[in-house]
Amino acid sequence: MKRLLITGGAGAIGRVMRKRLSGLADAIRLADIVTLTPEHDLEECIQCDLADAAAVNAMVADCDGILHLGGISVERPFDEILHANIIGMYNLYEAARAHGHPRILFASSNHTVGFYPQTQRLGADEPLRPDGLYGVSKGYGELLARMYFDKFGQETASVRIGSCTKEPVDYRMLSSWLSYEDFATLTERVFTVPVLGCPVIWGVSSNPASWWDNSNAAWLGWQPRDSAENWRETIEAEGIPSANDPLVTRQGGRFTELPIITNKPPV
């Protein structure tokens, strides 16, 4: 690619991917709502509020691919999620439509299906069961991506990221962990396969305890290499959660117990 846009460039995953994906394009354009500083000559930095359509349009111009990590990544009040994850997603797709349909990797989330029990193995076509407003917004993003593909041919991989961290840190992550390296190699495959379409892909490493079946995406040629199992002994030594703890009952973990956050007084 000539130019890869990474939104959410100041976030935890964005900071890692800007380094690991530096060879994927001639230039990396980093965008976030906060100020970013280029680390070398091949980086471009843009400050952009996703809810600002004109700013998003300028952000997307001249990009061949978009790694969309931007937006709210945790449960927050609806107004915040609305602006960043719903209006912002629409603005991104309208900008992509205006600028030649650059291929998109949309960072969706396991929280689109968080209320499924951990005893149920899921393919990518099960009905959504979001565990909060954040999960609802990611489900909206997947639907928007599908509509833009069917209507306009906009290619998108909706990657339902599990727990993308340096290493797994709790019992649930023995199933949901996605290593930085595995996410980087998945991203490379999304942007290099000749035809992508609009698949939903589980963003999870090669964890024996995973609840998610990625066989529908085998054609992509992505083979995750890392495994959370290497941390099992350490994590279990810190204590196994009780049998009714959502860390071991629901795929969304403790997100399923979070209240709806509101800035408004209760009715």
Image (cartoon, rainbow, N blue to C red):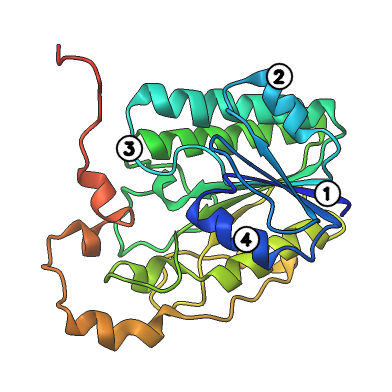
- Amino acid type, mark 2: Ala
- Amino acid type, mark 3: Gly
Name the residue located 74 percent from the left edge and 66 percent from the top edge: 219
Question: Mark 2 or mark 4, which has the lower sequence index?
Answer: 4
Q: Helix, strand, or loop for circle 1? A: strand
Give me the C-alpha separation between circle 3 and circle 4.
Answer: 27 Å
Tag 3 residue? 132
Tag 2 residue? 54
For label 3, count other residues whose C-alpha is less than 10 Å away and answer few (under 14), some (14-19) or many (20+): many
Q: Which mark is residue 231?
A: none
Name the residue located 59 percent from the left edge and 48 percent from the top edge: 9
Q: Helix, strand, or loop for circle 2? A: helix
Question: Mark 3 or mark 2, which has the lower sequence index?
Answer: 2
Pair 3/4: label in front:
4
Give me the C-alpha separation between circle 2 and circle 4.
Answer: 26 Å
Residue 62 vs residue 211: left or right? right
The part of the image, by quadrant, that contains residue 147 is: top right
Tag 1 residue? 3
